Every structure is written in C-alpha cells, then in structure tokens.
Amino acid sequence: MTREPAWNELLLQSEQLIRQQDQGLPLRIERDIRQVEQFSQRLRAKSIRPGGSDYLQDADRLLAQEGLDPALLRRTMQSYELKPRPEDLLAPEAAHSVGHYVERVGQALTVAGLQTSLRGTSLAFDSYMDERMEARWQQEREALFEWTAPYSLPALPLVGPGARGSAAERTPLGSVASGGAARLRGRAAQYAEVARRLNRARAAGEEFPLAAELGAACQAEPGGTERRTSMARVWKVLGSLLPAAQGVPVTAPSRRADALVQAARRCLEEEFEAHMQLTIRNHRSKAALGASPSKLALINAYLRVSLGSREQLDFDEPGGMDTTWHRIYTALRAGLTAEAQQVAATSRTLAGSRSTASAFPAALKEWVEGGRRPLTGATGSSITSEAERLLRDRGLRARGGSSFGHRLACYALLSGHAPAADVLGQISPPVLPTIEDFLWLRLGLVVVGGSSQSLGSGSQQGEVYGLRDLQQYLQQYPSSHYSHAGREPLQYVLVLVLTQQWTEAAAYLAQDPAARDLRVDAVYFCVALTQVGLLRDGAEDATLAEGAVLAGRLVHRYAREFLPVDAELALEHYMLAADAMGGSLEVRGRLLRELLVESRAFGLLLGSGGGGTGTGALAAFFPDAAARGAVLEAVADQCAANGQAEEAVELYMFCGRFAAALDVLCRRVSDAAARTGDAAADGELEVLVARGNAAAAALGSGVDAGSALGGAALEAWEQVKAAADALRAARAGDGSRVLQRLNELAFLPTDAWRVGPCTARAAGLHPALAARLPALVAAAADALAAAGRAPALAALTAYASALAPRFSQADFRHLSLLAAGLE
C-alpha cells in the first residue's frame, strides 16, 4: 500500500506528458533522477561484486534454455553502445500502455548499467594484464642480464697498469698487465692457479686433490667474508665425497651412489663430532670433561651441556636421569659405533627391559658389522616391529620425554623405517634440530637401488627407502626454504651435494639470483664434478647428461673471457672445458681451433719449433710430441675445412706437414691472383708467395722431398706462382712476360701436337690451377694474338674446345675475335 501513491503520481505525470505531446508543446520530464542513478549503481555493483559468478552462471543457464548463446551475447553487449533519444523511449505510438512504457524505460536502464559494468570490468582486466606483463618482463630481463654477464663481480676484477676503477669493476677480465698476461684478484686468482696445477698433474698422470685445493684457495682469500667461509665448507664436503666416487668406476652407478651415501654420512658425522668439541670448549665448567678424555667421556660431557637439565644424569650419579638412548644416539650421530655398542651392552635399562629392547645390543652389533645399512631378515623384522609399536604407543610417547625421540631414531636407523623418521619431525623437544641432523638420519635409511612408493609409506616386506625418495622429498620445497630466503644460498647447495643432486647444485650456483656472487665458484664446482665423472656426457641418467652440457657450456664461457687478455690462461681453462665436454679428440680440436683463431697467439701456444717439437704452452698438456702433433693436425684440418686458411697454414707448418701447407697456400695465391689490380691485393699476393717459398724450402729439405706427395706439392706450387705472375702481367698489359710464364705452364699448349697431352693433363690439375684455367687461357690468347702467333693461338683454341665444359660462351667469342683479327 505504501507504493500506491508513488505509482499514481507516476501515472499522472505520464498523462501530462502525453497531453503536452498532443498540444505540440516541448516535453518537460520531471522525475527523481537520483532513483534512476541508484538503480544503475545497484546493477553495476551486482555485476562486479565477488559473488557475481553465481549470478552469471544462473543467467547463462536461463539464456541457454531459451536457445541463446551467452558468450555471443556478452561479446555483442561489450561492443554495443546505447544512445537513446527521448522519442525512442517516450513516443506514444510505440508504447501501448503506461506499463509498457515503464517496462521500456527499465530495460534501457538495465542495458546501460550492464554496458557500464562490462566496460569497467574490461578496463580492470586490461590494467591487471599490463601489470603482470610488466612484472614478467622485468623478471626475464634480470634473468637475461644474469646469464649474459655472470662474472661481473666487484670483488673479482683484474688489476693491471692500465686498469681504471670503473672499467676494472665491470668484468674480472677487463684489463691486461704488462707482457699481455692478466692478473686476477681475489679467489679467482687462487682458483686459476689451482687450475694450472690440475692440468700439470693430469698431463703427468698424477692424482690431484682438486676439491681440497679449491677449498684451500677459497680460505686463502684475503678479507674473506662469512659467505666465502661457507664456500670453503662446500669444498670441504666435496673433498670428502669425491674420493669415494673416484674409487668406483663410472660403469657401476649403483656402487658409486652407495659409496657417496656412506661418504656423506661420514662427513656429517665428522662435522657433528667437531660441533661436540666446540660446544664443550664453550662450556668447560658445565661439561666437566677432564684432562684426558675418552670418546665416551666426550659424549657424556656433551650431554651435560646439551640436555641442560638440573637433574643429575645417570652416568654421574646412580639413580639420575636415564640417558641410555641419548648416549646411544649421540654416539651414532658422531660415528662412534664402538662407544654406542659399549653403552648398549652395559645399560641396565636395556638389560632389564621385558620388551624387545633387550635384543637391541645384538641388533646394533649386526647393524655395525653389516656396513651400517638397514637390517634385513629376522633381526630387521623384529626391529621394524618394535619401531611400529613405538609409533602406536602414545602413552609411552607422553611418558618418555626426550628419550622417546632418541629411542625411536635409533630403531628407525637400524630398521630403515621411513614412517618413524617422519614422526621424529613432530616430536618436542626436537631430535633433529638442524638440516644436517635430518639428512644424516635420512641417508642412514637409504638403500641404493631401492625406492618406496611414497615417502611416508609403511614398511611392508620388500619395501625400502631409496635415494630417489629422499631427493623427491627435498624437491617439494623451494630453494629459499633451505637458504633462509636467499640469505644463505650455500646451505641449499650443501643439501643438494649431500643428496647427490649434482646438476641442480651446478645450475643453482650458475643461474640463481641468490648466488649472484658465486658465479666463479660455479665454474670450478663444475670442473670438480666433471673430473671424477659425476657430470659426464653420455650418462644413462638424463639429468646427469644435462648437467654435463651445462658444465661444459659454463666452463667454456668462462674460458672465453680470457681470450682477449691472456691466451695462456685461456688455454688452461679451454682444456678444462674440453674435459667437461667429453674430452674427445674432436672436442679438443674444435676448442683449440677456436682458441688459436680468436687469440692469434700462435707463438705463445705452439712455440717456435717445427714438426710439433715446440716448447709453447700447449706442450704442458701434451708432453708427447707425437700426440701433440696429432691434435694439432686435427685442428689444422678443421681450420682448412672451415675456410680459416691462415690458421691452417700456421698449424701445418708447426706440425711439419709442409705439403698440406703448400696446398692451402696454392689456393690462397690462386684466389689472390684473381683479385690483383690494386696495391692491397698485390701486397697480399707478395706475402703469400713469400710464405709459400718458405714452406717449399722446408719441404725440399725435409724427408718428404723425394716422396710422390712432396714432389706433386712442389710442382703445383711452382705452376701456381707462374700462373699468378702471368695473370698479374696480363692485367698490366705486359704480353712478353705472359709469354715467358706460358713456357712454365706445361698444361697450356702452344703447338698443335701438344693439344692432346695437355688436354689429358688438365684432368689432374691442382684445384687452384683449375679454378684459374679460363683466365689463363684468355691471358695467353691475348699475348699470342699481340705477338701474331696464329698457329699457337689455334692450338690454344682447340685446347679450349676440348675442355668446353670449363669455358663460357664469352670465352669462345673472345678467342674467335682474336683468331679473326690474325686472318
């Protein structure tokens, strides 16, 4: 009833408007516009509020029932713009009644509200997409800069007499000291010296503790920060792991992985023992170690400090707090298995237990004698059953206090029971307070070659916990979880190294923004892994093969940084890059070719001796002259095949292959003769002829002078020289000199009886002469025509006709014109 007066008022106003329209008067619309605005705003809020999706689904369902396409309707409405006129809405002939008129007004307002809402939603979406694209572009740009300039470290510039501050800080290889040798600074210089010693040891066939030397180099850096100390710890861990890998061939990956697992456990145990000693030193009075402690006394002293209990402990006072399981676990954590067995054998707690705990000393002994691997058989089943019982007994967990966690950890370790290890993370106080404690226990559960279906699966018969299970568990969390949001990036590297995730560790050091100042360390990290085959090309594991590609590319790029400034240091790293790429003769040849071509340091790298007997820097990597010569010959062949003629000549001359050098020089002289006419081309031709004469002289005095190959090379060289001089004289218009050289070119006939033999000889011409044959025939024809020697010109024309495929129609027209001029 409250709406009836308003409705009557609306009808009255509408009738007045209709009368005004009939009388021809201008329409006067008197409405409450605020009502219309409020209605439009309500419609717009409905379309953009978070719960609008429900309304949209209902609308789509209703439209689909009417046979309409909702998506098509939305696209149409987005492009539709409503511009109503008063006559469109208020024309009396279009409105059959006042109710119809009001309905049309409501429809118009609805459409306008929907269009406004869609336009606002579209603008908001476009703005959001622009922001996301801008953020993505920033990330990709930073990643590109990281990859293209990975060694731009302010702490690692080169220093030299001509280096300025700004230039030296842009790149570690940005300046050159006197004599062309680069002087590195910081740990980069220490690492480079280690690389030199590594290459010398490998050439001599000696063992070289690379990780230990790199760790010493890292610690020797003056003014090293805490992060450098962390890198030294990484090298120390690698120094503990790599010898285990070296002792097992790469053809036995399971044995190698098992050896690395055991080495990782020993490394963590040694670190924990050092932590115990440091803790005791920092709390001497509370630890009460004594003057000449044993290992068991060391464990007791550590527990006095770590437990922090006000109660007396049982090993200090009878009836004190029971520490049996604490001492057994601590002894095992430090790798003191003999002390753990001693505690278990003499414990009254275990001896007087009515449960299977009384059998624990015997199980512990069997575990130690079995190589500290999870027990199998009847003993393993018994220990596993006890671990599962402990998991089910919530009352024991509540009563046991801190000893329950240590007891459960011992049973999990001996049985390889993964669910028990999972529960340890939920116990308070924590038994595994650090990531090192966690990794030590998990590595103790690992059986190499096995894999459970899931990390938290039960311990059914035949199910074991594999290394891959541990790796998958660790990969569930991002790197920031282990590196404290990037503040300690090397903590994550240690986790990867201890769990044998070599490729991931190398990629993190080389590419992750959190490890930006560790790019140089990443290079030598890859070198250390490739030297023992942990990252190798052709590995069965695709991840390791991918890591080998990354390592090779990383070391190669770092080696290229030395090319403009220090060829000898570049050679050291190029050899390391070759090892990372597989170490084949083809790879070494390709990298040596790149080094020689881009550095141009032939004298420094090869030396001054010939026949592969030089004393250059390369001799340090290939002490045997024959092996060095074979490598350089392969490099020279690659240079010749790739069009790098100058480099090929230098290498052939150094190797003593003068015939091959003459072959390359013949081609170069032939090409230069085709370009003669300016001072630059003539100067190049003279230089090439001088180098060829030196090679010919060396060949003539060598052991190959009398061989068929040496004789053919010398003959071809003399003819190429004569041909080049003839072409040069022809361009200068010196016909008499052309005729003189024509007598030296035995494959060009000047008598009719020589046409046949010369045609047969043309089939075996050197490629350098065959390429210039049309030009030589044209030059000889011009000289013979100028001298009026028609019979010789006719013989030359017959020679060209016999070799028609090698000549063009223009060549034959030229010969015909010359012959016609002599008639």
Image (cartoon, rainbow, N blue to C red):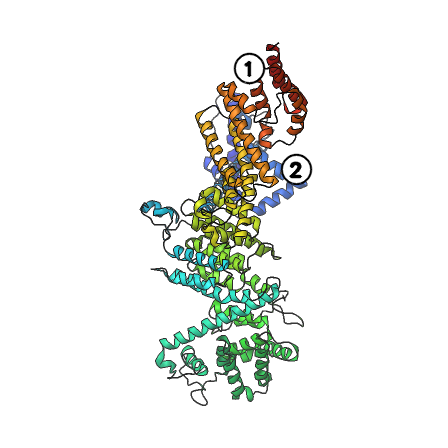
Looking at the rendered image, the quarter that the N terminus falls into is top right
Res 511 seen here: no
Question: Three-letter amino acid code at disc 1?
Answer: Ala
Question: Three-letter amino acid code at disc 2?
Answer: Leu
Residue 88 lies, in percent from the top left, at 55, 26
Q: Closest to the observer: 665 or 447? A: 665
Q: Is residue 530 positioned above or below 54 on the image? A: below
Q: Residue at x 57, y 34 (%)?
A: 715
Mark nearest the camera among 1 and 2 is: 1
Circle on res. 68: 2
Q: Secondary structure at mark 1?
A: helix
Looking at the rendered image, the quarter that the C terminus falls into is top right
Res 137 seen here: yes
Q: In the displayed orientation, state which residue is furthest to the top.
A: 823
Q: Closest to the observer: 339 or 772? A: 772
Task: Give the tally of numbered discs.
Answer: 2
Residue 187 lies, in percent from the top left, at 39, 57
- Are dots 1 and 2 in contact, CB under 8 Å? no
Q: Is residue 133 positioned above or below 425 on the image? A: above
Residue 521 lies, in percent from the top left, at 44, 56
Q: Is residue 335 positioned above or below 719 on the image? A: below
For disc 1, the marked residue is 787
Q: Residue at x 58, y 45 (%)?
A: 55
Q: Residue at x 53, y 84 (%)?
A: 344
Nearest to N terminus: mark 1 or mark 2: 2
Left or right: where 178 falls relative to 767: left
| Distance in Å between CA atoms under marks 1 and 2 | 98 Å
Q: Closest to the observer: 179 or 104? A: 179
Residue 39 lies, in percent from the top left, at 50, 39
Q: Secondary structure at mark 2?
A: loop
Other-residue count near label 2 (Cα within 10 Å), few / some / many at <14 / 14–19 / ≥20: few
Q: Closest to the observer: 258 or 119? A: 258
